[in-house]
Amino acid sequence: MKGKIDYSILPPENFEELWKLYELLGWNSLNLTANDLERMCKQSWYAVYAYDEQQLVGMGRVISDGVITAIICGVCVLPSYQSKGIGKEIVNRIIQHCEQNKVIPQLMCVDSLEPYYKDLGFRKFSIGMTKEINR
């Protein structure tokens, strides 16, 4: 880390940085472009971005109806910045925004991340399911 991490709701000027982050994490199995990621973020109900100076090092976003439910998704941190509390801060800011709007934050995660989210106050409540589509 170069300096203090700044958290913002302002998206990056260049979504190539987010594309590189998705690639580094192996999250781009759908072959999304930087434009796809920009649209994804800008259409989200709320998003938090973490910057080290001008470099995007993490982000998380929420899709929501703004009334009942908010689904937290895309919480990610550059590997070299992981285990420094950045993801936790992003999630806490998202939770705070949900609480201010009286919207219930929910998420789906892989089994290995269950303890991480449990430590942040989440509890298991359902079985997640997905349907494959042709893209």
Image (cartoon, helix red, strand yellow):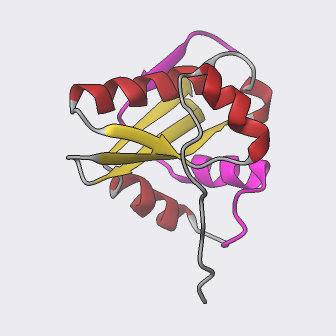
Can residue 81 be seen in this snapshot?
yes
Work out whether residue 112 or residue 80 is closer to the camera in this orientation and state it. Answer: 112
Residue at the image position 70 percent from the left and 16 percent from the top = 84
What range of the chain is rendered magenta? 1-30
Work out whether residue 134 or residue 35 is closer to the camera in this orientation and state it. Answer: 134
Residue at the image position 29 percent from the left and 27 percent from the top = 99
Q: Is residue 68 left or right of residue 57?
A: left
Q: Quadrant of the C terminus?
A: bottom right
Q: Could you tell me residue 95's position as x and y percent? A: 40, 28
Q: Is residue 121 left or right of residue 83?
A: left
Image quadrant where residue 103 sits: top left
Q: Is residue 18 magenta?
A: yes
- In the displayed structure, 133 sits above or below 33; it is below
Query: From this viewpoint, which residue is outermost toward the bottom?
Result: 134
- In the displayed structure, 71 sits above or below 6; it is below
Residue at the image position 49 percent from the left and 67 percent from the top = 36
Can residue 11 be seen in this snapshot?
no
Q: Could you tell me residue 94's position as x and y percent? A: 41, 31
Q: Quadrant of the N terminus?
A: top right
Work out whether residue 56 or residue 9 is closer to the camera in this orientation and state it. Answer: 9
Q: Is residue 46 left or right of residue 68?
A: right
Residue at the image position 43 percent from the left and 34 percent from the top = 48
- In the displayed structure, 75 sits above or below 108; it is above
